[in-house]
Image (cartoon, rainbow, N blue to C red):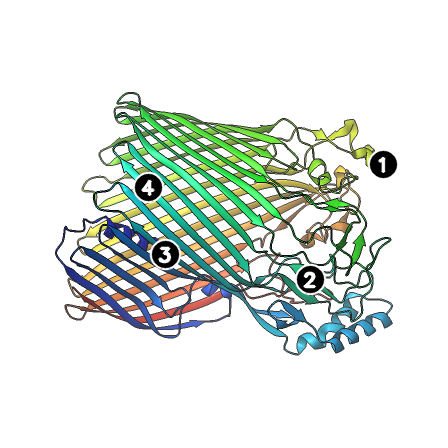
Amino acid sequence: MKRNGLLALALATLALPVLAQEDFDEGTVTLGILQKDFDTDSSKFLEYRDIPQGPVAPEVSFLGKKGSWRYQLVGRDFTQDDQRYFGFVENGTVRLTASYFGIPHHFGNGGKSILEATAANDWRLSDALQASHQQAIDANADDNYTFMSNLVAPTLAASPANIDLKLQRGRTNLSFAVTPRDSDFEVGVTYFHERRSGTRAAQGTSFGFSNVIETPEPLLYITQDFGVNGAYKGDWGTVHAAVRFNDFKNSFDTFTFDNPFRITDAVDLPVFGRTSLPPDNKAVTESVGGAFKIGDRSRLSADLTFGQWSQDHDPFMPWTTNTALIIPGGPPAVSAPLPAAALDGKIDTLALNAFFNTRLTDALGLTARYRRYDNDNKTPQIRFEDGYARFDSSWNATPRISVPYGYTNDSLDAFANYALGDVGLEAGWKYNRMQRTFRETESTSENVFRLAADYRRDWLALRGIAEFGSRGFDGYDAAHAEHASFLDAEEPANQTVLRRYDQAERDLTRFGAQVEAAPGSGKFSVFAAYTHTKYEYDQSPVPCQDVEFFPGQEAFCPGGQQAPLGLVDDGYDSITVEANLAASERATVYAFYTWEDGDILQTGRQSGSTLNFATSDVWTANITTKGNSFGAGADFTVVPDKWSASLFARFQDVDGNNLTSLLPGFNTAIYSTAGLQNCTSQTEGTPCNIAPFDDTQYTFVLASLRYQVATHWTAGLSVGYEDYDIEDAQTGNALNYMPSSFFLQANNRDYQAWVGGLTLTYRWQ
């Protein structure tokens, strides 16, 4: 909101005629002090902001004009992680603008790890402790939960690393434009720079499914973008062209992490693991376009953009870190040559956007929009003839090949509108086609028809809209995408009766209505809206593809087909009401309420190492999310030109629920692997309700008081209160560590906080 306000102010200032005012100079300086108090170290309190304890400089701004030159400089929250600056200088011929935004992101505080950082991208355990753990495990015949827990307990009790998962983004934008006097040409250059530094929760640091080592992922990204653009404006319209060069660099190519239980390599038991981090890459983008007047009633605009992406700088990591792994018939995997030194990644993109609008008569208008986006992945496929290393733990001799995924998306939106007095009517059609490579479907297409009507007269405005559509495909080959990464197709490992939600056949129903009213004098206004959206996925039987590969499974697939697995339906409803009352010249009050209801039903089936077609092992999950948000506020002028006050309060309650049903005959031994740990005591064939499912409550209250001390001086006092609570069965585990899996468990949960501030503002002009 603050960023948008700065940009809106800047654009409004630029729009003023340069010579429309006499020279002037004005500014604002606000200084203050903040005090905060919070009961927990939850990162949610400062997730995207910084609240210092002590002196602050909330705002410094300068605005003026001297001769033909105008200038402005605005700075917010100096010295804070979320500080922001914007400035420009221009004289009608040249314009120079600059901005900087600091964006903090706190993922979690006080995370714990059995490992410690020896470098930002290298987390280790002492050799002595690794050796001790290995010796104890080798000497013990039964590595059960109690034994493993007692083994690591002394280390975990000895004040393990205290980790804050957080990153800082700094975004700088510069632009310089020249518009020669008495010329229709404009040329300019732009520069963008973003630095991201810090950590976030890592993914993929694992030695197998039962030995997970969660660690911070280090970030030190530099993204730069340089562009040159030009435009020409005539009575018939405008044309423009640009070229941009983008460069991304990551200071860390890999991340290394120790296995807490090994000091010597063995098959399935590496000493340490290594994972790759986002690689350096480049992009070049060329664009051309224009907007044209066609007679008095028609407008046409079109933009064409080409892009060339490349990623060929960073070399591949070795096969593995494990010296015990041997390539079949070859050398140790740690020193074996790779099939390629680097990716040589290449993607060409094309984006076409076109818009056409015409008025056939004063009452009848036609509008059409078309967009094509093509992602043509030209990255060469790399063949792994001898297989690959998995989790640095074992060699899998299955030959594989890399898969350069790509897609093309076409969308068309055409509609007609007709004005009939105070009533407006609209009818239209949307078409969306997605073509994919190496996916289950080659092409899906969706057709949506839209009807809308609105009524506007005096103090009342009404609008209603309805959309109905469906998506389909010519064929769905469930095993195709899986086989694409194998040199020799094998029996599928994924459910062949699964229909993925982004490709599955579905029907869409969407409708809504809204009303705006300001009766009488207009001091009271109200807005209300309702929307309903529902996707229903086709549940017609689908073939049990490749069931012949699994002896005995044919009995579970009579007729060679079953009901599909995946999403059954996905619905969303919302109601919003807003009201505003100018109670008097000295008081304005407002309030709002939003109700939301999301409802998802999906089916799944648990399989082990062999694909399972047994319908008795099917489960359903009905996930619902209900939200209620209330808010109200008031602005008061207590004493004109002296005292003013404001009050705002908001409460949000989100109630999630997961009602899981297990069909009769469901194998209760696989509850935990199916992600149904909360149902381990449930009787088969009965529903299991997971009530603490992403339940959150948030309360926010802010009161402020302002006093006009003198003509140029204003003092302010503000007090804010926040209360955040979350209950969730999946993330609320109080244990930081499992016997052979270690999770950071950084704190991003409940908190209560108070913030108070005093400010003093000086304004001159």
Say what amino acid the circle numbered 3 marks. Leu
- Mark 1–mark 2 Cα distance, whole angstroms, equals 40 Å
Nearer the observer: mark 1 or 2; the answer is: 2
If you read the primary sequence from the N terminus, does the residue marked by circle 2 or circle 3 appear first? 3
Is residue 750 among what the camera can see?
A: no
Q: Give me the C-alpha separation between circle 2 and circle 3.
A: 39 Å
- Eye-nearest disc, 4 or 1: 4
Which quarter of the picture shows residue 54?
bottom left
> Disc 4 to disc 1, how far (Cα)?
69 Å
In front: 444, or 504?
444
Tag 4 secondary structure: strand
Q: Residues within 10 Å of mark 3 (few under 14, many from 20)?
A: some
Near mark 1 (Cα within 10 A), the count class, few <14, some 14-19 or many ≥20, is few
Q: Residues within 10 Å of mark 4 (few under 14, many from 20)?
A: some
Choose between 400 and 664: the one closer to the eye: 400
Could you tell me the amino acid type at mark 2?
Answer: Arg
| Mark 2 lies on residue | 274
- Can you identify the residue that label 4 sits on? 231
Q: Which residue is tagged 3? A: 174
In percent of the image, x 45 and y 39: which residue is there? Answer: 305
Q: Percent from the top left, x then y, of residue 150?
A: 75, 73
In which quarter of the view is residue 424 placed? top left
The percent position of residue 208, horizontal first and vertical second, equals 74, 58
Mark 2 vs mark 4: which is more N-terminal?
A: 4
State the residue lying farthest toward the top.
361
User: Is residue 469 depicted above or below 7 in this figure?
Assistant: above
The residue at 48%/40% (across/down) is 306
Q: Which residue is mark 1?
A: 552
